[in-house]
Amino acid sequence: MSDSILFDNIYNTTIRIEEIESLSPETQGKNSTVFIGKDLQMGKKFLIKKINIKNLRKSTSDIFEEAKILANSMHRNIMPLQYSSYDEEYIYMAIPYFKNGSLNEYINKFTTNQKMIEYCLDFLSGLAHAHILGILHLDIKPSNIVIDDSDRALLTDFGQSHILGDDESVAFTKPIYLRNFTPNILVKKEVCVDDDIYQVGLMIYRIFNDFYYQDSLNDLEKIVNQDQFIKYIIERKFPNNNFMPNVPNKIRSIIKKCLGRANDSYNSVIEVMNDLSRVDKQLHVGYEYHKESQTIKWRKLTETAIINIEIDLNSNNVIAKRENIASGNIRNVTKLNKSFKSRKDAFEAIKSHLEE
């Protein structure tokens, strides 16, 4: 065996990744794709982010900027970076693969509000750490919150992040989806901590209230003019101000405050976390939306009973039953078990019962 062949076999560092599974469009960025891949040299599964170098150079002079941010912002609730490499066309960032996926898989089917609050506190802890380091995330959405194997939420994807340094704001330079724009970016063309807080409000709205988030998007699809959409964001009319019965009043207030619809505002992510920690109503309420059958189910657990409520969104017919935990006896909840004149009337009645 010649020395050159031996050298190639030992030191060849050409990246060798086999794509095992593509992920949903929601996980894809403007300049990148994400897939489950197997590193053939390590024999291990990773979540691989593949970034187009050509497009990336339009927004940064450092093609490893995101990798450096992840490597230098280690925290329990920030996704760790395993390694980063590149070839002539792409950068490859390998991060741990967790079978639980992202929060995107939970927003229309979760066991309790309390569990979703715990996930929020997790990712907000990671975001607060990033802010201490002078890093703005600026792409906060359910698909960028990953649930690890210990059932904790991790903040990931710093591809749109900006570094503040000693300044309170910096010029906005990177492209993001229009629906994730903030009023401040659209008006001032700069970013600050307030923009992450705004996106946190949008994120919490989606986690607990995705039904109305999608409803807001459907309404805006009727607006062909992009300028009108921008106007809605600047005027803080997107998303709409409707809430599902399962959303506690304190969480509604937090969302409005983050989105700039309240008389006062948050100065830091820690303040948002403090208010989330104080939510004490409807903690044991679960939610499940079935788009195909156009039905929504709620499940409330009390010390003595399990309450199941289901609504047919086409007829506004509600079926509600109460099961006694001790005896197993099931009875109808009379004031809810009927057809309502409107969805609004049905939701108000259901909300009152979930608050009891």
Image (cartoon, rainbow, N blue to C red):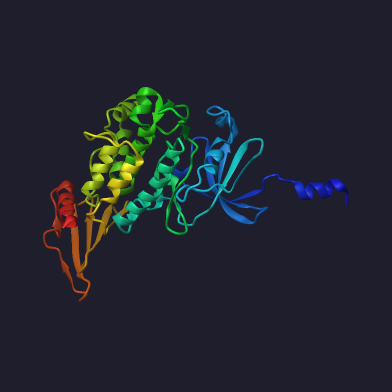
In percent of the image, x 85 and y 45: which residue is there? 4
Q: In the image, is residue 308 above or below residue 275?
A: below
Picture coordinates of residue 293 (x, y %)? Answer: 30, 54
In this rendering, the count of numbered labels is: 0
* 117 on left or right of 42: left
Q: Quadrant of residue 266?
A: top left
In percent of the image, x 65 and y 54: which residue is there? 42
Front in this rendered view, residue 318 or 70: 70
Front in this rendered view, residue 307 or 261: 261
User: Residue most toward the front?
Assistant: 166
Front in this rendered view, residue 108 or 325: 325
Picture coordinates of residue 177 (x, y %)? Answer: 42, 34
Picture coordinates of residue 77 (x, y %)? Answer: 45, 49
| Residue 224 visible to the viewer | no
Q: In the image, is residue 57 above or below residue 306?
A: above
* 210 on left or right of 156: left
Picture coordinates of residue 309 (x, y %)? Answer: 22, 59
In percent of the image, x 53 and y 45: which residue is there? 34
